[in-house]
Image (cartoon, rainbow, N blue to C red):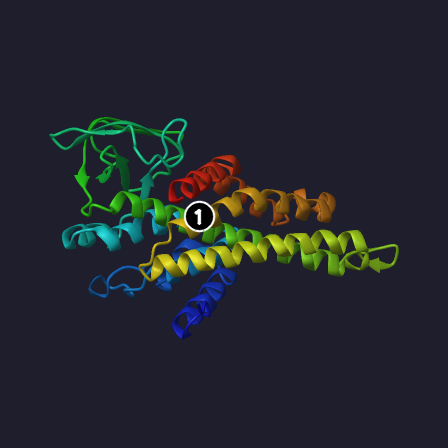
């Protein structure tokens, strides 16, 4: 398999870097550059591209640990609607509204069988956690299925990330596989963002140990430092390869479930200790509010929590392996 980027993908990577490095209003700048509509159909002014191209933007955002709602809007909103929405739903949702999703429920980050219930009259009732505010939310419900909810509608309250639905009006998102695919997009988006976050932390740390001196020598020349930064490199490189393979399979319509679970497990298990090593090698500087490393570690922690944590991802992966044997 050849995972090298084509010309269009290379151009997206370069453009995302240029935009993010040249502005103090990254979300607006990404929109103006057309990088938030890569997966939007061409008839609606987008580029008509797919998962991998969107993931390249997420990785660039993660590499700089920029505080923007990219995971929720792009991976949990634009991609599923572009892949599964009807023409009318695409016309409504892909031309302006901020999108997000409500997947997690108390005690379960990505439930395969959601407890949130869809009534015969089209209303939904249940509780979702870890929800980010948006103009429209894709909500997973029992069935399993996915519905679209307006947070301003009657019966909907969103407080401190807790979404409560009490006979709230909803619109079904078409497609029998939509629920499973929304979870795939969630894993893909989180892993792409996390891949960038760890790569950015590694780049900051490598530069620090290369230029910071102790006893008249660069820190990088000390054997213990070199071994630790090498461990971070191995963790980051392995994560990148696992994420790239999963994205390639998902973007080309192949079965990507195993690859996504492997990438998610590796990220949740290996990224946090790698980030701690980066902080250790920085000393006190890594904790400074004026230095960006803390943003990378905060983003990694948030993504690990979103994915359910290392033990949860290992359990999911183990169950998948057992069920296939």
The answer to which quarter of the image holds residue 247 is bottom left
Which of the image's four quarters has the N terminus?
bottom left
User: In this rendering, does residue 138 appear at all?
Assistant: yes
Task: Work out whether residue 198 or residue 287 is closer to the camera in this orientation and state it.
Answer: 198
Write down the residue under mark 1: 190
Q: Residue furthest front?
A: 325
Residue 69 in view: no
Give the vertical position of 3 relative to 166 (above or below).
Answer: below
Q: How many marks?
A: 1
Residue placed at 74% from the left, 56% from the top? 209
Q: Is residue 62 left or right of residue 150?
A: right
Quadrant (top left/top right/bottom left/bottom right) for the C terminus: top left
Within 10 Å of disc 1 (Cα), the crowding (few <14, some 14-19, many 20+) is: many
Q: Quarter of the image holding residue 146?
A: top left
**In the rendering, at what x and y percent does residue 40 appear?**
27, 59
Which residue: 32% across, 41% down?
A: 101
| Name of the residue lying farthest toward the right | 215
| In the image, farthest residue toward the top | 166
- Position in image of residue 90 (x %, y %): 20, 53
Above or below, 57 relative to 69: below
Q: Name the residue located 34 percent from the left edge and 44 percent from the top edge.
A: 183
Residue drawn where x is 44% and y is 46% of the image: 261
Furthest toward the bottom, the residue is: 7
Q: Position of residue 318 (x, y in %)?
A: 46, 40
User: In the displayed structure, would residue 227 be above or below residue 128?
Assistant: below
Depth check: 323 or 192 in front? 323
Looking at the rendered structure, the secondary structure element under dot 1 is helix
Residue 172, percent from left and from top: 18, 41
Camera-side residue: 110 or 92?
110
């Amino acid at each position: 398999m050849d995972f090298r980027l084509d010309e269009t993908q290379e151009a997206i990577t370069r453009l995302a870097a240029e935009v993010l490095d040249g502005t103090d209003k990254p979300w607006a700048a990404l929109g103006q550059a057309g990088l938030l509509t890569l997966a939007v159909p061409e008839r609606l002014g987008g580029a008509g591209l797919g998962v991998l191209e969107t993931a390249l933007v997420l990785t660039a955002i993660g590499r700089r640990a920029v505080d923007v709602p990219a995971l929720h809007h792009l991976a949990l909103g634009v991609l599923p609607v572009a892949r599964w929405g009807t023409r009318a739903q695409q016309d409504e949702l892909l031309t302006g509204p901020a999108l997000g999703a409500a997947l997690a429920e108390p005690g379960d980050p990505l439930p395969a069988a959601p407890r949130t219930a869809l009534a015969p009259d089209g209303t939904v009732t249940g509780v979702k956690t870890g929800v980010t505010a948006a103009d429209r939310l894709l909500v997973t419900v029992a069935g399993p299925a996915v519905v679209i909810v307006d947070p301003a509608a009657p019966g909907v309250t969103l407080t401190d990330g807790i979404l409560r639905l009490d006979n709230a009006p909803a619109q079904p998102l078409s497609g029998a596989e939509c629920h499973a695919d929304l979870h795939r997009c969630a894993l893909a988006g989180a892993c792409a963002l996390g891949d960038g976050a760890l790569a950015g932390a590694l780049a900051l740390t490598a530069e620090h140990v290369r230029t910071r001196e102790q006893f008249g020598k660069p820190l990088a020349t000390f054997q213990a430092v070199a071994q630790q930064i090498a461990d971070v490199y191995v963790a980051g490189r392995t994560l990148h390869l696992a994420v790239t393979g999963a994205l390639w399979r998902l973007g080309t319509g192949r079965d990507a479930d195993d690859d996504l679970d492997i990438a998610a497990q590796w990220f949740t298990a290996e990224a946090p200790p790698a980030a701690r090593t980066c902080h250790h090698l920085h000393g006190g500087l890594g904790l400074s509010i004026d230095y960006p490393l803390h943003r990378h570690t905060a983003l990694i922690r948030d993504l690990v929590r979103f994915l359910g944590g290392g033990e949860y991802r290992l359990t999911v992966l183990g169950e998948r392996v057992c069920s296939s044997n």
